[in-house]
Image: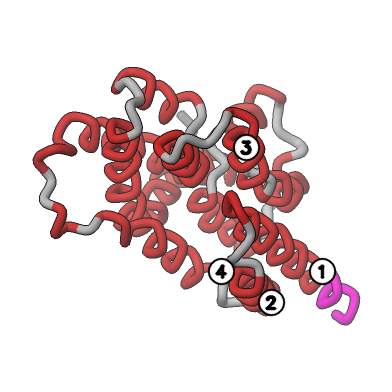
């Protein structure tokens, strides 16, 4: 591996590591919830490796446990991941020059946490005359989260029954997104996205199947994109 690529990869792993504080108990909660919903352990672990979408995975097993039908479950989980289209659009300008194999790998690793650190890294560092190795940073961040998610899922599946209820692993979900907010609220676009998403989530909390949360995510990201473009025109 090129020395610059190695530095970028390690930097991505290092910068992603603090976000594991929320991701690891999140993965454990998913593993425990999967068993409680009657999902076989092997299938729950396979979903973590193939689907790799924490919030959607947790919603699916919770809806299965509640007896929801296939269509509502598929629709809710699909809508919950619509935000990744906006993440992809945000990153496309930085990654368009890469070969397809690279774009496919990075698309697979694109999560809330990986996007948060990667996009800030891309924005902070303009490409120099040297070969652009920043995609290795993205790879390091995404791989770190993927690896931790697999281990934490397995831990929840194997040791879930022995974890005391007093641990209250449910705190991991809001903790994860609070950690992301500390990264993304540094700029006006992130502040606008947070304000709009927060307001929408409160106003639409009564909608079924967590659709209020999905709409809040989409409107918040749209507000962030609109704000960023407006600031670019003003500048």
Between 68 and 36, the residue placed more toward the observer is: 68
SS class, disc 4: helix
Number of numbered markers: 4
SS class, disc 1: helix
Task: Mark 3 vs mark 2: give the one in front.
Answer: 3
What residue is disc 2 on?
Answer: 192
Between 210 and 100, the residue placed more toward the observer is: 210
Please tell me which of labels 2 and 1 falls first in the chain. 2
Judge left or right: residue 109 versus residue 22. right
The answer to whether mark 2 and mark 1 are in CB contact below 8 A is yes
Majority SS type along the magenta span: helix
Between the residue at mark 2 and the residue at mark 1, the CA separation in whole angstroms equals 9 Å
First to last magenta residue range: 229-235
The answer to whether mark 3 and mark 2 are in CB contact below 8 A is no
The label number, if any, that marks residue 72 in the structure image: 3
Between 97 and 61, the residue placed more toward the observer is: 61
Quarter holding the C terminus is bottom right
Please tell me which of labels 2 and 4 falls first in the chain. 4
What residue is disc 1 on?
Answer: 226
Please tell me which of labels 1 and 4 falls first in the chain. 4
Residue 159 visible from this viewpoint: yes
SS class, disc 3: helix
Please tell me which of labels 3 and 4 falls first in the chain. 3
Please tell me which of labels 3 and 2 falls first in the chain. 3
Vertical position of residue 7 compared to residue 97: above or below: below
Between the residue at mark 1 and the residue at mark 4, the CA separation in whole angstroms equals 15 Å
Between the residue at mark 1 and the residue at mark 3, the CA separation in whole angstroms equals 31 Å
**x and y percent of residue 128 in the render?**
67, 53
């Amino acid at each position: 591996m090129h020395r610059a690529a190695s530095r970028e990869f390690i930097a991505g792993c290092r910068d992603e590591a603090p976000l594991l504080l929320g991701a690891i108990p999140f993965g454990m909660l998913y593993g425990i919830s999967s068993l409680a919903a009657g999902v076989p352990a092997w299938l729950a672990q396979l979903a973590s490796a193939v689907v790799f979408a924490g919030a959607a995975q947790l919603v699916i097993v919770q809806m299965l446990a509640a007896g929801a039908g296939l269509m509502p479950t598929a629709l809710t989980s699909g809508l919950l991941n619509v935000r990744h289209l906006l993440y992809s659009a945000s990153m496309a300008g930085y990654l368009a020059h890469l070969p397809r194999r690279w774009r496919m790998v990075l698309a697979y690793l694109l999560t809330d946490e990986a996007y948060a650190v990667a996009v800030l890294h891309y924005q902070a560092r303009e490409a120099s005359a040297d070969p652009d190795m920043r995609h290795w940073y993205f790879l390091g961040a995404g791989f770190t989260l993927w690896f931790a998610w697999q281990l934490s899922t397995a831990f929840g599946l194997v040791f879930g029954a022995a974890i005391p209820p007093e641990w209250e692993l449910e705190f991991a979900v809001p903790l994860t997104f609070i950690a992301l907010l500390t990264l993304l609220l540094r700029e006006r676009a992130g502040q606008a996205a947070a304000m709009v998403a927060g307001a929408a989530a409160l106003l639409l909390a009564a909608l079924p199947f967590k659709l209020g949360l999905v709409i809040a995510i989409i409107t918040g990201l749209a507000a962030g994109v609109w704000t960023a473009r407006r600031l670019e025109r003003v500048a």
